[in-house]
Image (spheres, rainbow, N blue to C red):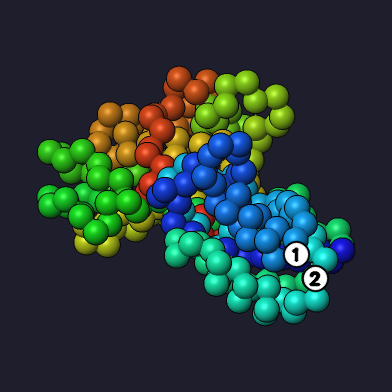
Amino acid sequence: MVNYRFTFSYDGTRYHGWESKTNADTVEGRIEAVLTRMVDAKVDIHGAGRTDAGVHARAMVANGRLETDKTPEEIKDYLNRYLPADICALDVAVAGDRFHARLNATGKVYEYTLYVGAEKPVFDRNYVWCVPQGSILDVDVMKKAASYLVGKHDFRSFCGNNKMKKSTVRTIYDVDIVKEGDYVRMRFHGNGFLQNMVRILTGTLVEVGYGNMSAEHIPEIIAGMDRQLAGPTAPPHGLCLMKVEYD
């Protein structure tokens, strides 16, 4: 069988995350069902990450083995014909036999979008976090706090899994925070992220932006290696996986 590399975009609003689950509607489950139908045999795919329920992706990479006479372009066309409108196959290509979307990934880029306007963002409500109104979100101090996150650290304080046994050391290459009108976009670039890590980082930076926590407190949170020290977990729907990197 041939190992294929897939790239998908999806709106995660109505799904219980990426990863296939019994009796739950997931993005991966939908894709596997279409591929299984196409080749008339059970197909398993492996995503570069496991986005939570409600989280979106501009470019999720996955791989899977298929036995088919279809060309990559024909596979892509078949996927887009039968997948629901909120999942799109952007690219299908033959991959090396040993390629694995998650194990071979060298970096990921996530973007979290905050809405700070006075009016409810009716048409964007599934893609932004409407942060509390009444006080000004200080983006400059958030940028200062974010600077302490850059580098190689043990991010256990920012991990949503308290029973994590594997290493919680990760490297963040850059955190870019930009205010565009009523929107604040926070882009996180790193070699990998722990469960809920970007959402916890976001919740913590928002606490700093509202003055509930100082920027200088970030190194103490990192050193403490205690989830209780960090801020709240931001809602899932403001988060989007933008890119997966490979050597």
Q: Tell which of 65 and 187 is nearer to you.
A: 65
Say which label, 2 or 1, has the lower sequence index.
1
Residue 112 percent coordinates (x, y)? 40, 51
Residue 62 percent coordinates (x, y)? 67, 58
Asked where in the image residue 60 lies, by quadrant, the reply is: bottom right
Residue 73 percent coordinates (x, y)? 67, 79
Which quadrant is the C terminus positioned in? bottom right
Asked where in the image residue 164 lies, by quadrant, the reply is: top right
The three-letter code of the residue at mark 2 reads: Thr
Res 25 seen here: yes
Which quadrant is the N terminus positioned in? bottom right
Kindly identify the residue that appears in the image at 45 percent across and 61 percent down: 86
Q: Residues within 10 Å of mark 2 (few under 14, many from 20)?
A: few
Lateral position of residue 129 relative to residue 23, left or right: left
Lateral position of residue 72 relative to residue 159, left or right: right
Kindly identify the residue that appears in the image at 57 percent across and 26 percent down: 161
Q: Residues within 10 Å of mark 1 (few under 14, many from 20)?
A: some
The three-letter code of the residue at mark 1 reads: Val
Lateral position of residue 54 relative to residue 9, left or right: left
Q: Tell which of 34 and 142 is nearer to you.
A: 34
Residue tagged 2? 68
| Above or below 157: residue 3 | below
**Mark sitting on residue 39:** 1
Lateral position of residue 155 relative to residue 130, left or right: right
Res 220 seen here: no
Kindly identify the residue that appears in the image at 48 percent across and 26 percent down: 221
Q: Secondary structure at mark 2?
A: loop
Q: Are marks 2 and 1 in contact (CB under 8 Å)?
A: yes
Residue 35 percent coordinates (x, y)? 68, 61
Q: Secondary structure at mark 1?
A: helix
